Image: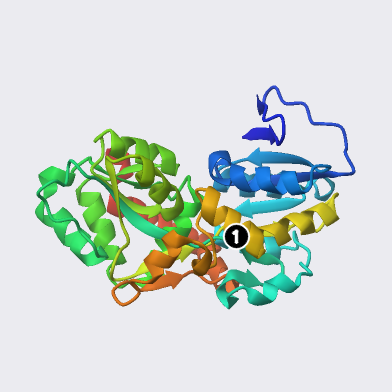
Amino acid sequence: MRYYFIGLWIVFSSALFAAPKSNSNALDIYSATDLRAIKPLLDDYRARHPDVQVNYHEFNTLQLYQTIKKLPLDQQPDVVISSSMDLQVRLVNDGYAQPIKDSALEALPDWAKWRNEAVGFTYEPIVFVYNKQAFKGKTIPRTHESLALSMRSNDAFYTHKVGSYDVRRSALGYLIATQDEVASSISGRLQESLGRTITQVYCCTSQILDDIASNKLVLGYNMLGSYSLARAKHDPRIGVVIPEDYTLVVSRVAYISKAAKHVENARSFVHYLISKHGQQVMADKSELIALYPSLDPLTDRLLSTKQTINFHPIPLGPALMVYLDQSKKKRFIRSWENALSPSKQ
């Protein structure tokens, strides 16, 4: 976990960090979003609100959820942000959020909001990422089915060279894997193919991208599109495939804590995230993908190919909690472990 004081940009490790004195005009954000990706938004928000001390605390998705659950109500942050949509829904359902009273919510698509408490503000396709040099002269899989077939028929090429999220350690990875099962009848066959090639499992997107770039891996499966597309834009070794049969879309979700100490600043920041101005900054300057396609040339280009790509935004709502049931989660992870056999890696 890292703490960032926006303005000075001094980074402290959790072991050395001493909590700042209470500031009535502060804003405490707990987020599972890389600082590099969201920094342009934080910078712009602070420029527009120079009197607000923004304290940004970075976690991975599972660590964030566990931290929120452990903290007493009077120690909760003002705003919580995560791409783990199911865990955000659970926290809202468990009473950790307060209503967001903002007319800007009316413009959001229905799938990106729930109970006016959980709000999605990004549009992030789940993609395949590949090493361009490794695939030179080879057919690049562009659907889930063609990927499964390719892995089955090219064992030597893929074995030990495919990476994906460890669903036991990555809450985002678990969300994507379970939604894959909901969206596709071939998810089980794909898991078997991933197991046959001895897929390497990771906690974090950046580590998979690093290993693809270095050719330690030839392909990354079910990767977060925002980080992958941003990396590919600056790294010619990396290519990105938007699956043509169906493409899951996750949204980074924010809520305002029920016990937020700086509630007006929290409301102001969430409004900024979903406002046209904030979305434009996101589209123009950040590594995140704006929720509104018309503002983001990248998203607009992706959506313009909807004749061949079936974008499937994951809707916020109680259905996301089905796979959080403990018995169902244990069964899913056991099945995933049996398919991928990570213990043999």
The residue identified by callout 1 is 279
Compared to residue 196, the image places residue 292 above or below, namely below
| Foreground pick, 52 / 151 | 52
Tell me the crowding category of disc 1: few under 14, some 14 to 19, or many 20 or more residues within 10 angstroms, Cα based: many
The quadrant of the picture occupied by the C terminus is: top left
Nearer-the-camera pick, 9 or 340: 9
Position of the N terminus by quadrant: top right
Q: Residue 15 falls in which quadrant of the image?
A: top right
User: 217 and 131: which one is in front?
Assistant: 131
Where's residue 319, x and y in %?
55, 73
- The scheme the figure's colours follow is rainbow
**Count of labels in the image:** 1
Task: Estimate the x, y position of residue 18 in percent, counting from the top left.
Answer: 77, 26
Q: Residue 102: in sight, yes or no?
A: yes
In which quadrant of the rendered view does residue 71 lie? top right
Rendered residue at 70%/58% (across/down): 272
Residue at the (50%, 69%) spot, across then down: 294
User: On the rendered structure, is 138 left or right of 337?
Assistant: left
What residue is drawn where x is 56% and y is 47%? 62
Residue at 67% over, 27% down: 10
Residue 331 visible in the picture: no
Q: What amino acid does circle 1 point to? A: Gln
| Residue 53, quarter of the rendered image | top right
- Percent position (x, y) of residue 210? 35, 36
Q: Residue 70 location, x and y as percent? A: 71, 45
Instruction: Check disc 1 and report its element: helix, strand or loop.
Output: helix
